[in-house]
Each structure stands twice: as structure tokens, then as C-alpha cells.
Amino acid sequence: MGYAAHKEIDTSAIPIIDIGPLCDGSAEFDVAREIHEASRDVGFLYIRNHGIDPELIATAHREGLAFFRQDDEIKREVSINRDHRGYLRPGASKMDDDAIPDLKESFVWGHDFPPSKKMRPLEGVNQWPMSMPGLRPVLERYLAAASDVARHVLRGCALGLGLTPDTFLQRTSRPLSRASLTYYPPQPETLGPEVFGVSPHTDFGVLTVLCQDEVGGLQVEDYEGDWIAAPPVPGTLVVNVGDLLARWSNGKLRSTPHRVINRSGRERLSIVLAFDPDFDTLIDPSVSCADREVPGHDPIACGDYLVWRMARAFSYDDGPS
């Protein structure tokens, strides 16, 4: 039995980048170059001077743990629906068709779309638990702050590729971004090496902004296929390239497999933003192509791609259709 194997290495394998000069415009091209190199070579980076209030992070973390510590029947009152909003029970997600379902639980929210007969999949209204009236304002503030971080980093990605700064941000007024509180219970070693808090996967969308707690458990796959720990670094967030951004960059940026094993014996809570543009945004690799470079994929609408990927990964049996 035991846990899946990984290597402990120096954290310098994943660069730590100060994005302050990108945010304030004082040295945006220098930071963009660092972001590009990290996104090209590793697909993961730590960022500091990101601008999210530490007190907001602490409050969201505290409220998140309080939500998951409630009885199951209370959490299920806001069970996940087909617009991917609400509570996702343990075992309701698996990142690969052949994978064992994940141990994690999640609470998911995103941009609130006004009710309309023309709403498309993933364009929904958030569900908020009546048991915790203070959760909504905290999480809405966090979503806005983390989205600002994602916009800055995507500007850096575009500049690093030699593109105009708004290349990946031209349509974000009705974003399909999802944020989640993700809870990992302590994982006993006796469960064996094929069980994970979240099993090996790449992220579906454009860009992920992750706020880890101090517990740890995130692991990233390197070029040799070995798993390396990506431990918490105080004062930083973790950012990684998703599949859609790798596609949009015509493979110049790397969407890297990663997983979570909570070996700590303690609860672990992450706050995750999966940042994505509007449903109809065309993910067209040709925008990143140099002269005579051939796009590796056909263009696809952001929403169509995400609907397809989520249908494969998540069970919505608990929630209404």
C-alpha cells in the first residue's frame, strides 16, 4: 500500500515571480518575460505581490472550513447543478475515465448571469447556503480580486508571446470563470497509491490561480514524468497554464499534469480560480503563430470546449438539471 511516489526537490524548480512591476506598469516586459519562461518550461509559477488582501484570504479560508464541517444534509441543500454551481460531494469528480473518483469536496461559484431563456450551459446563477449568510460576500470579493490577478498574468502571457496585451482578454464581460473552495480530508496511507485527493490531470480552461493553505499536498509532473512537490510558499499564489491557453498559444505554453495527495493528517483547503473568458470567445491558435507556422488545432469556442470537458469529469447526480 502506501502513497503514490514523488520527489522532494528545491522549490526553485517552480519559479517565484514578483508581478508587482507588471501590475503597476513599471517593468511589465521584464515580468512578462519571466512569466513566459515559466509558462513555457514548467507550466507552473508562484507569484508574489499579487494584491489580494491577506485578511480576505484568511476569512475565505475560515468560512470555507466552516462550510465543509457542516453535516452532509446541510451541504447537499446546495448540491452541484448542471451549470456547475454549488456543492460537489466526495467521489463526484474524476479527472480521467479510468481514474478512481477523487476524495475532495468542493463548493463552486462564479459570475452570476441574469436569468434568461437564452442562457447556455455554464451560464448560471450561483447557489448560496442559507446556513452561512456571510459566505457570499466574502467569496464574491475573493472572486473579483483573484480575477484581477488572472487578468494581469494573462497580459504578461500575451506580452511574453509578442502579442498585444489584451489578446487573451478581449471578451470577458460574461466570463465562464469558476472559483471553488476545495476541501481535502486527511488521506490515510492505507488507501494505497491509486487514490488521490484529486487525481493526475491538466486543467481544462485558460488559467488557474490557486491559493494553497499551509498544509501542502500539491504535486506537479516534470518533463521526465516524475512527480515533484509544489509546497506552499508564504505570501504567494500558484498560477498554472490550462489546456485552453496551451491550445491558444499553439503549444508555446505548457499545461502541466498535477495532482494532490494530502499526507498531512490534517484538513487541507485550497481556494481556486479557473479563469475563462466569455462562452463565444474563439480559442484560435493562429493568433499565436509566426509566419508560416501551422496551427496545431482548429478554432473552438471556449464554452463548447468547457462543456465537453466537464461532462466527462463531473457527476451531477446530486443536483437538479
Image (spheres, grey):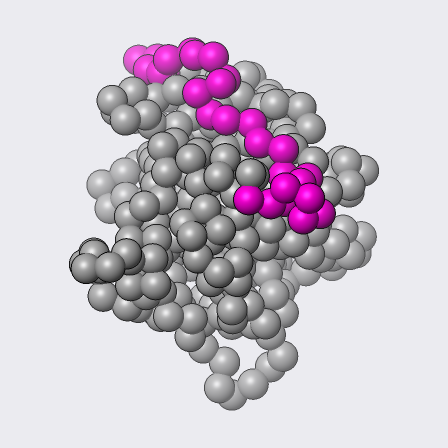
The reply, left or right, for residue 276 in relation to residue 211 is left
Quarter of the image containing the N terminus? top left
Q: Which residues are magenta?
A: 1-29
Q: Is residue 315 visible?
A: no
Q: Can residue 25 be found in the magenta stretch? A: yes
The reply, left or right, for residue 269 in relation to residue 280 is right
The reply, left or right, for residue 228 in relation to residue 34 is left
Q: Can residue 180 be found in the magenta stretch? A: no
Q: Quadrant of residue 141?
A: bottom right
Image coordinates for residue 257, horizontal then vertical, percent: 34, 35
Q: Is residue 123 visible?
A: yes
Q: Quadrant of residue 315?
A: bottom left
The residue positioned 70% from the left and 51% from the top of the image is 145
The residue positioned 44% from the left and 29% from the top of the image is 260
Q: Residue furthest bottom?
A: 117
The residue positioned 41% from the left and 49% from the top of the image is 161
**Camera-nearest residue between 129 and 39:** 39
